[in-house]
Amino acid sequence: TQRTLVLLKPDAVRRGLVGEIIRRIEAKGYTLAALDLRTATPELLAAHYAEHEGKPFYEPLVEFMLSGPVVAMVLEGERCIEGFRSVAGATDPTVAAPGTVRGDLGRDWGLKVQQNLVHGSDSLESAEREIGIWFPNL
Ligand code: GTP
Ligand code: MG
């Protein structure tokens, strides 16, 4: 079965939405293969967000991801990579569909698109790469 790397970003932890988001993940039928509350480091985020380095939102994104603890997890399940991204909804919470995490719970007060509650790997390759970054022993 497939694996994917999911992060509950600092806004999710700050707003007390960890339980609600994990509830949706479990309700969908995915298995938790790893789960850890941790504070990211600049090194970890540089590896995780390497594809975005140099983009205008990169620095504020890294700063935001360092602003508090995140919940890192590995999900297992049939087609869970695209499945979790559909649970998460579109990147911008303003236009994310109702029924999705970002559509139901996301806010963009101040147009801070980076505060969109969750991250999910977007391909098989990025899932294995990101799992290696966050859970090297898995
Ligand atoms: P992730 O699951 O978090 O990777 O989201 P995504 O795949 O929907 O978006 P993408 O990988 O393109 O961007 C990574 C993260 O950067 C997003 O989740 C946002 O937090 C942030 N981001 C992306 N685009 C923008 C933008 O235009 N402005 C701002 N401020 N942040 C952005
Ligand atoms: Mg992405």
Image (cartoon, rainbow, N blue to C red):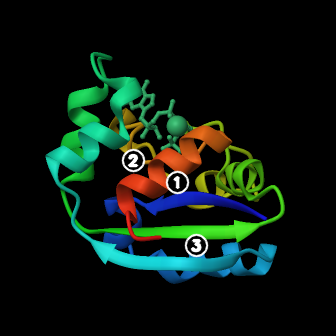
Residue 64, given in percent of the width and then of the height, sits at 24, 47
Q: CA distance from mark 2 to mark 1?
A: 8 Å
Q: Name the mark on residue 115.
A: 2
Q: Earlier in the sequence, mark 2 or mark 1?
A: 1
User: Is ligand 1 less than 8 Å from the beta carbon at label 2?
Assistant: yes
Q: Residue furthest right?
A: 78
The reply to whether discs 2 and 1 touch (Cβ–Cβ < 8 Å) is: yes
The reply to whether discs 1 and 3 touch (Cβ–Cβ < 8 Å) is: no
Residue 93 in sight: no
Q: Which of the 4 image quarters holds residue 47?
A: top left
Left or right position of 118 against 22:
left
- Which amino acid type is marked by label 3? Ile
- Return the residue nearer the eye: 102 or 56: 56
| Residue that numbered label 3 is attached to | 21
Check the image and report above or below for 91 versus 35. Answer: above
- Which amino acid type is marked by label 1? Gly
Residue 36, given in percent of the width and then of the height, sits at 38, 78
Q: Which of the 4 image quarters holds residue 68?
A: bottom left
Residue 101 in sight: yes
Left or right position of 26 against 61:
right
Residue at left 27%, top 45%? 45
Residue at left 38%, top 34%? 111
Element class at badge 3: helix
Residue 55, given in percent of the width and then of the height, sits at 32, 17
Q: Earlier in the sequence, mark 1 or mark 3?
A: 3
Left or right position of 80 against 124:
right
